[in-house]
Amino acid sequence: MSSRAPLLAVLVVLSFFAGITGVQLAYTLAYVLLLLLVVAWIWSQILARRLEVHRETPEGAHMVGEAFTERFTLRNRSVLTLPYCQVNDRTRIPGYAPGRACALNPGGAVAWTARGVFTQRGKLAFGPLEIRLGDPFGLFPKTVRVGESGTVTVYPSIHQVDAVLRPVWTGGSFGDIPHGRGLDVPPDISSVRDHAPDDGLSRIHWPSTARAGRLISRLYESPQSSDVMVILDLGRGIHFGEAPESTLEYAVSLTASVCHAALARGQAVGLVTNDRLGTAIGPGRGETQRLRILEFLATAQDSGRRGIAATIAAHGRGWQGRGGLIVVTSDREPDWVEALVEVGARGQRHLAVMVDPTSFGASGPPMRVGPAWRLALDWWIVRRGDALSAPRRSRAVGM
């Protein structure tokens, strides 16, 4: 309206002057200004109705840190010139701004490709678009809105954490094999799988290798199951920092990495949380289980009111003898450690993954890992900026 105000004021003055004086020139100028306003309004309306917008967005599932591309096409279907057009995208992806400004001849089109990177997990929608255009005189600007054109699921990033889980693959404790290849257990073959670089030659199953045309290794049954149950702490008030540099994002990414690594080895993996719904995904194997876990972790939030210690006690006793427990938390209270020690089984050491909240800006001292805890559990202390794909793990790590 501000661009039209001076013109409307002149039109009113000319009309008044022409009415009281009868001067022909005043009438002519008034008619010209009125005609200009009508033409500008019609021009703007036609352009808004005949503008065609096409957007090709990513589809399916992606992962944090993955690059993506979008292609935009803007076409002027009218017989009028589009003197200016400004495209603004409202997609909520940090650092992603695919909009641009352009002008189009009658029947003309412009296309461009925008590139970005998924920097946060969750269900992300592309759009809406807001396109601002108008007539050549700028008197009647219009805004054309195009709704959301697609939604993708972005999974948390996955890191290589095989070194942490190698003892679990062989059914032992987390702390009994700090380096090198896991020891073979008594030769009760349960199944076969693809050969891994850390498998010895004695594990190769030659008949299957000959049939498959690639190295195949034996899987041995262990006196104790090598299944894995991951307990993720999603309690309210224990996480600090802003995504992506927050304890919550680190914890979710580590959980996804641990589950992915164990499933890739053919283990049964379950996931338990203390979120608002008390989500628990029962143990399972294969790609279906991996997708179930990743789908949940993509939108997981710290909404729980129940402490992680109660969750460990509730699920840990039923897990005794089935395999290892891995607790991922940022809670500095000691009660969850005592609960994890309490549900321990003979010959099985559980793993505590502590995402240190003090390195993310939390006030107060870091958690102190006492000697008794070091003897009972294995610890992986994660701080802000740590290279998660090359973990520093130890049987006795203090803070």
Image (spheres, rainbow, N blue to C red):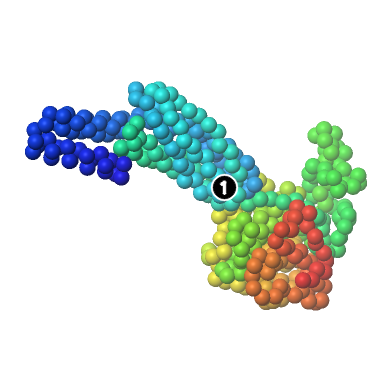
Mark 1 = which residue?
A: 95
Q: Position of residue 280 (x, y in %)?
A: 60, 61
Q: Residue at x 71, y 73 (%)?
A: 366
Pick the residue in front: 167 or 328.
328
For the view shown, which residue lies furthest in the right direction? 202
Pick the residue in front: 266 or 395.
395
Tag 1's secondary structure? loop
Pick the residue in front: 331 or 243.
243
Q: Residue at x 28, y 32 (%)?
A: 40
* Quarter-of-image position of residue 62: top right
Do we see residue 227 in this rendering? no
Pick the residue in front: 117 or 374.
117
Name the side, left or right, on which 311 lies relative to 354.
Answer: left
Q: Quadrant of the N terminus?
A: top left
Q: Position of residue 282 (x, y in %)?
A: 63, 58
Q: Position of residue 258 (x, y in %)?
A: 71, 55
* Quarter-of-image position of residue 225: bottom right
Name the side, left or right, on which 259 lies relative to 141.
Answer: right
Structural crowding at the residue carrying mark 1, measured as other residues with C-alpha within 10 Å and reported as few (<14), some (14–19) or many (≥20): few
Residue type at mark 1 is Gly
308 is higher (above) or lower (below) than 391: below
Q: Residue at x 72, y 63 (%)?
A: 383
Q: Quadrant of the C terminus?
A: bottom right
Q: Position of residue 110 (x, y in %)?
A: 48, 28
Do we see residue 298 in this rendering? yes
